Image (cartoon, grey):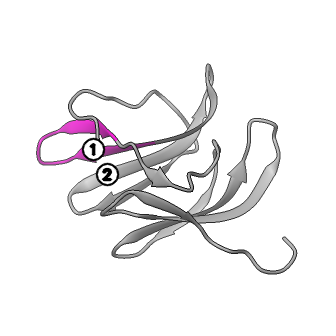
Amino acid sequence: MESGTAIPSPRCAYVAVWHHSKIIVFSGFEESHGCLNDLYEFDIQSLTWTKIEATGALPSGRWGSAWTKDDTHLYINGGESDQQVALSDFYSINLETYEWTEMPSLGTP
């Protein structure tokens, strides 16, 4: 993990979740870079941002994903790509290890 002043760029349509006194921010759309798949953590105690170098099967850049969270994982589904294609993939990330896993999808999207 990079630490300190790694502030995320301005963006819209991102995912943000609260986890153990931290705000986790994933993806979104930025005018100059398009769809993003970066991951940041904001520590409420120290008021610092950290850019997370996640491992595993990273999702592609996207914005507008559906998401939910449990005690240990964030789950994202779909969103839209830079090519304005609706995505139908499904991923989870372990919020302790920051490892992504692509989840199997059954049936026709």
**Residue 80 coordinates in the image, percent (x, y):** 73, 47
Find residue 52 and name its label.
Answer: none
Q: Residue type at mark 2? A: Ile
The quadrant in which residue 35 appears is top right
Query: Magenta segment: does it hold 43?
Result: yes
**Residue 103 coordinates in the image, percent (x, y):** 62, 71
For marks 2 and 1, the one nearer the N-term is 2
- Residue 29 vs 89, above or below: the answer is above
**Residue 106 coordinates in the image, percent (x, y):** 77, 80
Q: Residues within 10 Å of mark 2 (few under 14, many from 20)?
A: some
Residue displayed at 35% across by 62% down: 95
Q: Identify the image quadrant of the C terminus.
A: bottom right
Locate residue 37 relative to residue 64 in the image: left or right.
left
Q: Residues within 10 Å of mark 1 (few under 14, many from 20)?
A: many
Query: Magenta segment: does it hold 41?
Result: yes
Q: Residue type at mark 1? A: Phe
Locate residue 41 relative to residue 92 in the image: left or right.
left
Residue displayed at 27% across by 44% down: 42
Rounded to the nearest angstrom, the CA distance separating label 2 from label 1 is 5 Å
Question: In the orientation shown, which residue stands out farthest toward the top?
Answer: 32
User: What residue is disc 1 on?
Assistant: 42
Classify mark 2: helix, strand or loop: strand
Q: Identify the image quadrant of the N terminus.
A: top left
Residue displayed at 27% across by 37% down: 49
- Residue 83 vs 109, above or below: the answer is above
User: What residue is disc 2 on?
Assistant: 23
**Residue 61 coordinates in the image, percent (x, y):** 63, 42
Q: Which residues are magenta?
A: 39-51
In the depicted view, which residue is nearer to us: 24 or 98?
98
